[in-house]
């Protein structure tokens, strides 16, 4: 269940945060022109004034440059350069979990840009097959809760993801895997098996949990407008009652907070990389 004390964030700060994450994740690239203020207001379903406030924040951070009243471009040259691969003594397996709309994929992309490691996102890998499978089973494209999905589709999504992870690690590649992992990270036996398999592959497993408030989550889901989120948005109070924003994995992990008043994902990713490098150095010295 969500925390009743979570403060609501101003909408312009939420929008600025979402656009900042897209810039840092390489979704919005250096030199790319943003839609006009009115177009952005329509996309976000907010007032022109709210968009102007969000743009003012990003302009002050140096991420957006206004050429005139209606033309704004991204100014983030670091997103244009291909990241150099961070080489550590053993392959890294970074497992990134979180609720839908928490920003886990954005964090994974930011981390991938900083390290040059391979990112494997469950929805990217399996979405076309899942949608076709749901159609063949006569289910709705937004079905992610029914026994049909949970028993006949979901296990194979994670099986395919795990196979891709293992294949890359066997080739010596470090991996960032992004998926909800909602059931997996509450199952100590599953975590133990995953850790044992990582050990077999001579890889270092790190668990990351991305969390955010309900307002941020709702904004992410509305913005991406994915078929898989339609039921959640149409039944938001019911869905939110099933979300525990206070949950953290019951094993050592890194917590990433993705709200407007949190550190930027880029900073949190950089700190995470520092911790991994320090741990790798300690292991090499033993």
Image (cartoon, helix red, strand yellow):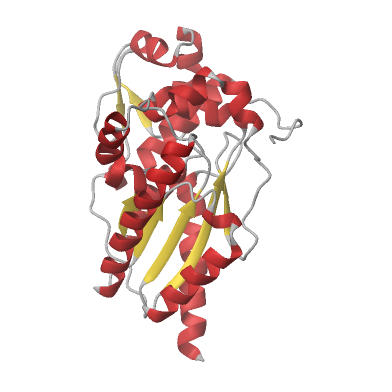
What residue lies at 54% left-to-right and 65% top-to-bottom?
191
* Residue 38 in view: yes
Between residues 286 and 228, which one lies in front from this camera angle?
A: 228
On the image, which quarter does residue 188 sit in?
bottom right
Count how many numbered circles sit on residues in the image. Answer: 0
**Quick one: quadrant of the N terminus?**
top right
| Rendered position, 63 above or below 164 | above
- Residue 56, how many percent across, how many down? 47, 22
Between residues 224 and 233, which one lies in front from this camera angle?
A: 233
- Residue 179, how many percent across, how many down? 43, 48
Residue placed furthest toward the right: 5
What residue lies at 42% left-to-right and 39% top-to-bottom?
149
Left or right? Give the position of 106 relative to 72: right
| Rendered position, 17 above or below 125 | above
- Residue 254, how many percent across, how many down? 57, 59
| Rendered position, 151 above or below 284 | above
Between residues 235 and 154, which one lies in front from this camera angle?
A: 154
Left or right? Give the position of 284 relative to 9: left
What residue lies at 62% left-to-right and 64% top-to-bottom?
251
| Rendered position, 109 above or below 5 | below
What residue lies at 49% left-to-right and 35% top-to-bottom?
145
- Residue 192, how many percent across, how many down? 54, 71
Left or right? Give the position of 276 relative to 86: right
* Residue 226 in view: no
């Amino acid at each position: 269940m969500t925390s009743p004390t979570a403060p609501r964030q101003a909408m312009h700060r939420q929008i600025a945060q979402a656009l900042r994450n897209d810039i840092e994740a390489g979704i919005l690239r250096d030199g790319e022109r943003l839609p006009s203020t009115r177009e952005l207001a329509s996309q976000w379903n907010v007032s022109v004034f709210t968009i102007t406030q969000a743009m003012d924040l990003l302009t002050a951070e140096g991420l957006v440059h206004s050429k005139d009243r209606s033309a704004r471009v991204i100014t983030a040259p670091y997103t244009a350069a291909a990241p150099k691969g961070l080489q550590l003594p053993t392959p890294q397996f970074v497992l990134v979990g979180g609720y839908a709309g928490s920003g886990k994929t954005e964090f994974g992309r930011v981390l991938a840009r900083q390290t040059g490691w391979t990112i494997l996102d469950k929805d990217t890998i399996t979405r076309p097959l899942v949608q076709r499978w749901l159609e063949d089973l006569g289910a709705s494209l937004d079905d992610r809760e029914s026994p049909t999905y949970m028993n006949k589709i979901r296990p194979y999504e994670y099986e395919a993801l795990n196979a891709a992870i293992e294949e890359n690690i066997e080739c010596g590649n470090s991996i960032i895997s992004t998926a909800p992992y909602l059931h997996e990270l509450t199952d100590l036996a599953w975590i133990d098996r995953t850790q044992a398999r990582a050990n077999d592959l001579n890889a270092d497993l790190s668990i990351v949990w991305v969390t955010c408030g309900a307002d941020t989550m709702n904004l992410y889901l509305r913005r991406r407008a994915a078929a898989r989120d339609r039921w959640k948005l149409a039944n938001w109070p019911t869905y939110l009652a099933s979300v525990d924003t206070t949950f953290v994995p019951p094993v050592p992990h890194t917590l990433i907070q993705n709200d407007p008043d949190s550190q930027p994902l880029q900073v949190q990713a950089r700190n995470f990389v520092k911790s991994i490098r320090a741990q790798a150095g300690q292991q090499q010295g033993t």
